[in-house]
Amino acid sequence: MGTSTAYGGPGGGTPLVPSWLGGGDDGDAPPNPASPGVGPDDQPPADGAAPPAPPNRPPIPKTADPQRFSGARNSFTRFASSGGSDRASLGRAVSKYVSTSAGGARQAAQRMGASRGSGARFFGFLADAQARGVREALRALDLESLAGRPIAEIFVGLADYICPGAGTVDEGIAREAYIETIVELASEGLTDLTTFTSDQMQTVFELYATHAIEARICNDIGTKAVTMPTDVQAAHRVEQQLRDFIRGGVSDALTRARSGTPNHLMPEQIQAFVDAVYESAFAILQTLGDAEADQ
């Protein structure tokens, strides 16, 4: 659905929130602790002393319900097969994804992994550009040479800072969402970064979060397992309706978040703000999905 990272969906036994999503560092796995009562090389301690305590190890994530994606996938297939006319199935697909597939709004937000980090860097740059000017914001990143360039070129030049790495599906989602945001700038009338208002800054982040959530949902339910219409216009209508549905939830979440926060967030507050927006967006999407399904 508009993202090159699409695949057949995760296996049913994949944990709701993979252990690598929230950390950010891909360090080596810790060594296996020694068995109780043995020392180095599995030999008993020479002096009879108690063996050293094993190092702390991260808990193994619980295995999730292997069928948790089927409800969302089946509902989305019905929506897609209708060519976009079965809005009740769209609502059920999104609601079931949040409530069952992801395990609730908070877990769904945690699954965004790289998109949360990239979203915070993107939002932070936009806020800095508005507060101190584009040139100063770029200078802070050693990218002052981009000052004065068209907005699309500036954002392309920021890509490796906003979305470092693209080796995992999660990182690929973040980067693809960023690229699709750049593509949509002109159609949204966002052409001059130097004159951005707060509302325009919200629109840019809204685009990014929408694309990221759309790609996350489509990758999770497995776009290759969903039967899409063969008619190109119908397929486009399905994709656009899903995107518009998600964007409505993201827009409401951003509006709520902005109403309860200062106009200018401190750098250390931005990640928490972005995380809250994602969680709120998923909660709103579940509510909107339930309402759509009941009509």
Image (tube, rainbow, N blue to C red):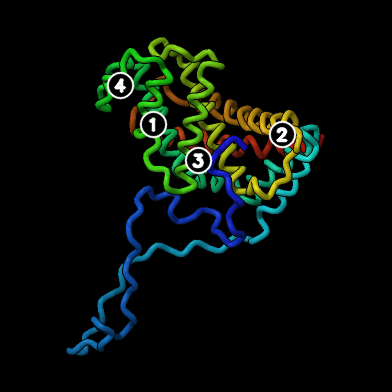
- Whole-angstrom CA distance, mark 1 to mark 2, is 29 Å
**Disc 2 target residue:** 235
**Disc 4 target residue:** 137
Q: Earlier in the sequence, mark 2 or mark 3?
A: 3
- Whole-angstrom CA distance, mark 4 to mark 2, is 40 Å
Quarter holding the C terminus?
top right
Q: Is residue 8 above or below residue 212?
A: below
Dot 2 crowding, Cα within 10 Å, few <14, some 14–19, many 20+? some
**Disc 3 target residue:** 173
Quarter holding the N terminus?
top right
Q: Residue at x 33, y 82 (%)?
A: 36
| Callout 4 amino acid | Ala
Mark 4 in CB contact with mark 1 (< 8 angstroms): no
**Disc 1 target residue:** 159
Q: Which callout, 1 or 2, points to the residue nearer the camera?
A: 2
Q: Where does residue 106 sit, x and y in percent of width and height?
A: 54, 45
Q: Is residue 162 above or below residue 198?
A: below
- Whole-angstrom CA distance, mark 4 to mark 3, is 25 Å
Q: Quadrant of residue 255?
A: top right
Q: Earlier in the sequence, mark 4 or mark 3?
A: 4
Dot 4 crowding, Cα within 10 Å, few <14, some 14–19, many 20+? many
Element assignment for label 4 = helix
